Image: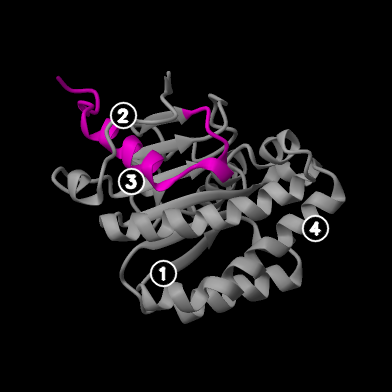
């Protein structure tokens, strides 16, 4: 189901904080290229505009008291895109972190990254590692970038590690359950998402957090990511707060 792109009554941070906010919000930031094409701009212009939205939404999530914000920045499938676009996408984390890292540190945000970082260019890895180190002592919002991430790959790697640990006698068959399996995933130290947001009108998960989203609430909007505003996040959380979450119970 699609949510409205606007809301009649402007919500405020105060309004939203009257009810419990989701601990973990995950966002599939979709529609950058289409946003640019509608304006006769190169696709990379949409990605650059989307970077500015990341800053705004991170600041708002932090002020709301959200504990984890996971952003799908680059999937394992995105390598199929034109090389010029991929090269630009690999430079965005460098630009974002070089520009906004002092602000993230000041706002007590901790940067994390999940995905296969070994396949990334050296300059991307260096920027990410520096941000992780410099924010490691922060205990506010965790800003978690999914970078060269694919959920099926993550699950397969978890299965391989579990099989190896069973062979080595580190793990017993009877110890394999949902909790132990989750400890082999890239999100082992953070809670599962409570709310998933996807922009641009697409209604699919696109190989994102397939295990972790089992009981998340989904919120879709036609709005392209570069046009996603603070009010859209507030609306998504307001809708989340109105839903009954029974986790299979009654």
Q: Is residue 90 left or right of residue 103?
A: right
Q: Is residue 104 above or below residue 67?
A: below
Q: Position of residue 91 (x, y in %)?
A: 72, 64
Mark with earlier residue (2, 4)? 2
Which span of residues is magenta-colored? 221-250
Quickly name the residue at label 2: 8
Q: Position of residue 203 (x, y in %)?
A: 53, 24
Quickly name the residue at label 1: 110
Q: Say which of 53 and 129 sits in front.
A: 53
Residue 234 is drawn in which quadrant? top left
Q: Mark 2 to mark 4: distance in Å?
A: 40 Å
Q: Mark 3 to mark 1: distance in Å?
A: 25 Å
Residue 238: say if magenta: yes
Mark with earlier residue (4, 3)? 4
Q: Mark 1 to mark 2: distance in Å?
A: 34 Å
Residue appearing at x 34%, y 48% in the figure? 24
Quickly name the residue at label 4: 87
Mark with earlier residue (1, 2)? 2
Residue 231: say if magenta: yes
Q: Residues within 10 Å of mark 2 (few under 14, many from 20)?
A: few
Q: Position of residue 194 (x, y in %)?
A: 32, 40
Mark with earlier residue (3, 1)? 1
Mark with earlier residue (1, 4)? 4
Tag of residue 179: 3
Q: Say which of 102 and 82 sits in front.
A: 102
Question: Which label sits in the foreground, 4 or 3?
Answer: 4
Question: Which label sits in the foreground, 2 or 4?
Answer: 2
Residue appearing at x 47%, y 67% in the figure? 111
């Amino acid at each position: 189901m699609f949510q409205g792109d606007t809301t009649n009554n402007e919500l405020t941070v105060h309004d939203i904080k009257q009810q419990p906010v989701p601990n973990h919000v995950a966002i599939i930031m979709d529609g950058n290229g289409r946003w640019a094409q509608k304006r006769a701009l190169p696709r990379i212009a949409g990605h650059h505009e989307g970077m500015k939205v990341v800053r705004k939404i991170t600041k708002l999530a932090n002020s709301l008291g959200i504990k984890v914000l996971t952003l799908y920045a680059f999937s394992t499938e995105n390598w199929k895109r034109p090389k010029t676009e991929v090269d630009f996408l690999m430079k965005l984390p460098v630009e974002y972190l070089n520009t906004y890292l002092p602000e993230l540190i000041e706002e007590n945000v901790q940067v994390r990254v999940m995905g296969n970082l070994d396949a990334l260019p050296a300059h991307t890895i260096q920027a990410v590692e520096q941000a992780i180190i410099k924010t490691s002592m922060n205990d506010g919002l965790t800003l978690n970038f999914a970078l060269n991430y694919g959920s099926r790959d993550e699950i397969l790697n978890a299965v391989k590690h579990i099989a190896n640990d069973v062979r080595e006698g580190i793990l017993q068959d009877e110890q394999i359950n949902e909790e132990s399996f989750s400890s082999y995933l890239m999100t082992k130290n953070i809670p599962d998402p409570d709310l998933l947001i996807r922009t641009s009108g697409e209604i699919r998960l696109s190989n994102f957090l397939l295990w972790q989203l089992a009981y998340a609430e989904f919120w879709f909007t036609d709005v392209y990511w570069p046009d996603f505003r603070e009010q859209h996040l507030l609306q998504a959380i307001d809708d989340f707060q109105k839903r009954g979450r029974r986790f299979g119970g009654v």
